[in-house]
Image (cartoon, grey):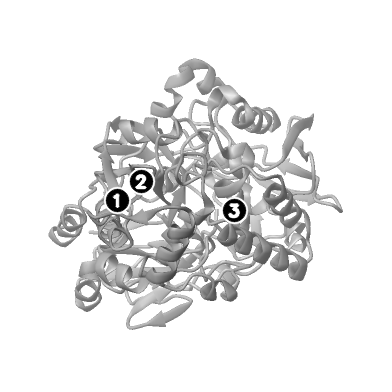
Amino acid sequence: MRIPTTQSPKGEGRRIRSGTARVSRRTFVKIAAAAGIAASLGETLGETGRTLAAGAGQGGELFYALSTKFDTLDPNVTTFSDVARIAYHIFDPLVWESKAGVFVPGLAERWEVNANATQYTFHLRRDVKFHDDTPFNADAVKFTFDRIVDPNLKSQSAFSAIGPYDSSVVLDPYTVVVKFKEPYAPFLASVAQSILAPVSPEAVKKYGNDFGTHPVGTGPFKFDSYATDSAVRVVRNSGYRWAPSIFKTRGPALLDAITFRIIPEATTRLAALKSGEVQIIQDVPTQEYQNVQRDTSIQLLQGLMTGSGWTMMINVTNPPTDDVRVRQALQWGVDKTAMNRAVWQGVYKPASSILTAATFGYDPATRNVYPYDPKKAGAVLDQAGWKMGSGGVRQKNGQDLTLGMYYRADNSDFTNMATFLQSMYAQIGIKIDLHGLSQGGYFSAVRAGQHHLQFWWEPDLDPDVVRILLYSKNADGGTNRNRYKNAEMDKLIDDAAATTDPAKRKQLYSEIQMKTLRESVMVAFADPLDLFAYQKGKIDGVVLDWSATDVLCHGVSLRK
């Protein structure tokens, strides 16, 4: 996990603008950070963030509003960021990332990495138990990692994050060696994420396919209940004694319970915060951004997202988007500045790459590749044989140039993006058929490759996020829904993950970005801000991690 700049009700944090906390730009995760030495508390947490204010105390239940329905509470399987956020409270990672490239002990007390980053040896805590009272040990780590790469699990994000995993060897009950088929420098950043957190082997055996509705970890909160598409409730783990050093309180959480309510509608979510129905929300609606900034009863937390922002995956195997010229027209044919104003009220920044500008390795030269140019879009479609028809839709051999765009209808951003792009692409003669589906129908369709176009965004700490988006092994129903398979790209991704030289790594990620643009595998629309808000004066100890991705409630207390 990436931990924490701490936010007090006064907006204290790493960088402050207009009374809101902002998070600094992602820097390179050096292999030298693998020494396993804990950073001092002062380096990671502000002085006021964990100090209880007058009137604050233990007990009570916090209500946190999520924005998205999800597939499963199994962190090793999901693709959803909201599940990862919940999982940080139910599970513990082996290490935590206190700030970019700085790692502190979690369930692992210390670790060593060999010279070429093909082996990571973790020395584990001896006093940890899972919520089902079974021991946490090296066998549990091996079980978890082997489980993730088992094809029967159908792991999504975790399968990508574990990279070229080979095997885990248990040296003794509290020492495990994780081996990779080739050098994998980003592994510490990956294993700091909740999606690679150890799960209880006994609970997995007990619940089988239902583990996703009965998650069992080692974290500060135990799973209590899940009302499908409505709420997840967790309760304090009174036996918790192994919080990382970045928290002043190493023992149990202060709260009795947290209920994560699922409120997809953005204005309803904000109204629930203002009324006190919930105390924390995520994904503050951009149309209310200015109003929230001015509201003295609300503390806004924000930061530039690292990883991959709002993008569109293009199915390169489904005609006519199997033709690179059609895909290039989709690049030149969209006015990203206008899209940012129409969909996100100008709060986000137009994007040019599959990596956000806040991510290490982002290449500013990508800004010059596809400026908005509808004439060039039309010309390349003409070259591909798609001529403008009398009805304003291009045709070839009597067939309309029609593309199917698939998205989840319960997400207003997706809906707004889809309708904007339908209008935009109509101007260059491309007809977009909108398929706004329920969650289950959407996943069935896109994992089967029925789509031409689908939206994506992927918060991540490391530029190896490109593995999730472009790696051949993640095609055919995995996270690479471009269904793009390219040996040269795979080698670039592997080489970038293998090197520990920052300059060489940056150059490789530049090549990856440019190759993605040349072949027009994805269209990047916006670099988002992560936007959270909480009730000022009602709660204390709210922590936003350094990457602005996750709010941690380990030390949150309610004011009496």
In three-dimensional space, the C-alpha distance between marks 2 and 1, rounded to whole angstroms, equals 6 Å
Q: Which residue is mark 1?
A: 431
| Residue at 39 percent of width and 74 percent of height | 21
The image quadrant where one finds the C terminus is: bottom left
Q: Disc 2, disc 1: CB below 8 Å?
A: yes
Could you tell me the amino acid type at mark 3?
Answer: Val
Amino acid at circle 1:
Lys
Residue named by callout 2 = 403
Say which amino acid is labelled 2: Leu
Q: Earlier in the sequence, mark 2 or mark 1?
A: 2
Foreground: 330 or 556?
330
Res 148 label = none
Q: Is residue 349 left or right of residue 491?
A: left
Q: Secondary structure at mark 1?
A: strand
Residue 298 in percent (x, y) is at: 23, 69
> Residue visible at 61% across and 66% down?
100
